[in-house]
Amino acid sequence: FLRRLFEAEVPEVAEKIIEIKGIAREPGSRAKVSVVSNDDKIDAVGACVGIKGSRVQAIVRELGGEKIDIVPWSQDPVVFVTRSLSPAKVLEAQIVDSEQKVLVSVADDQLSLAIGKGGQNARLAAKLTGWKIDLISKSERDRQKDLEKRSRIDIEDLENAGPKLREKLIRAGIETVQDLLRAPMEEILEIQGIGEKTAEKLIEEAKALEARRARELAEEVARAAEEPRLTDSLEPLLESPDEPRGPLPESPEAKAGEIVKGAPRKGGVILEEAARLRKGAEIEEDPEVAERVEIEEDYTPEEAAVTERDPEGGELPERVILAEEPDPEEEEEEEPKKDTKEETRGDAS
């Protein structure tokens, strides 16, 4: 039905100048149509769309508002899959060996657009191209590439292979342990100087090396997941997304008894609490500290803070206090006492 509508609205389609190569459709919702021009002078997509979209809009109205994506067909499956995922912009696409599948990488903010509502965009693209499509974000693809790079084991690491044998393997296209494990036994035996026993030894060693590397990477990932992140501990304290302008409390530059200018104000962030950050502990606000500790932006650390010491000269447990002005109420209490003494002297006279 959709093909007939294009033939009725687009003369070039009716005259076979433009060929509709395929249609993938979910009636009433969305459709993707791949087209190719048999005349180099005619743009297939432009002819189907029409001036200011007049031709395709007529078809959309006939279908009750069904959305239509017109995709330029390509013989190259990677190019065709990339185009079929429109309106999403594809960063990278590659065919996965031994599978009718294309791995597609898109920007993180384009992933939901490429998938579509309920997976519709990716589903229609797969139907139109005839290829399975594996969509992945750029950040995840970068992690995969890094893992692949670090898991690579060069053929030179095989102890059972001498220099000459390694050279023969490389000339045969087997440059890594992974290549050796993927290669069929028949292909390995065709290499001059490699018999069945030698091939079995090489494969056995290759499996052991790959298993060891996999364990090392798994342990590294597990350790990274267990390490506490300082940013997670600091987030509840920050009143704004701005980063602190001075060194963080755990930094070696932050010396004992020093208030870091620009550090979060909320709760005072005294050194006792800062030490707990290293253990991933959450910092709770101290109401008493919050009442008496306030750092003004125009104060320098020397003006704002002092380190309390005991009478014998030794430092007390590390904590930060602010130099405070005398309490006005205390001054008022002292003045009446002075007046009382003067009155007593007058009576005595």
Image: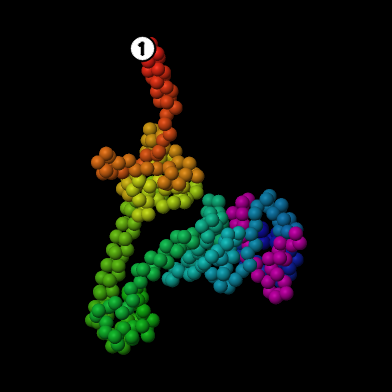
Which of the pair 20/193 is nearer the observer? 193
Above or below residue 216? Residue 322 is: above
How far across and down, in percent of the image, does residue 108 sit? 51, 57
Q: Residue at x 41, y 46 (%)?
A: 302
Q: Which residue is drawn at 42% across and 29% down?
A: 327
- Colour convention: rainbow
Q: Residue at x 43, y 34 (%)?
A: 325
Q: Quadrant of the C terminus?
A: top left
Q: In which quarter of the image is the N terminus?
A: bottom right
How far across and down, in percent of the image, does residue 318 sit? 31, 43
Which of the pair 159/35 is nearer the observer? 159
159 left or right, relative to 100: left
Farthest-out residue, top: 347
User: Mark 1: which amino acid?
Assistant: Ala
> Does the magenta-highlighted stretch encompass residue 31?
yes
Q: What element carries label 1?
A: helix
Task: Using the rendered image of the protein, determine whether residue 91 is visible from the camera's viewpoint.
Answer: yes
How far across and down, in percent of the image, does residue 334 sit? 40, 23
Above or below residue 1? Residue 244 is: above
326 left or right, relative to 55: left
Above or below residue 97? Residue 137 is: above
> Does the magenta-highlighted stretch encompass residue 310?
no
Q: Which residue is drawn at 71% across and 75% down?
A: 39
Above or below residue 167? Residue 152 is: above
Magenta residues, start to end: 25-52
To which residue does mark 1 refer? 348
Write down the quadrant of residue 190 in the picture: bottom left
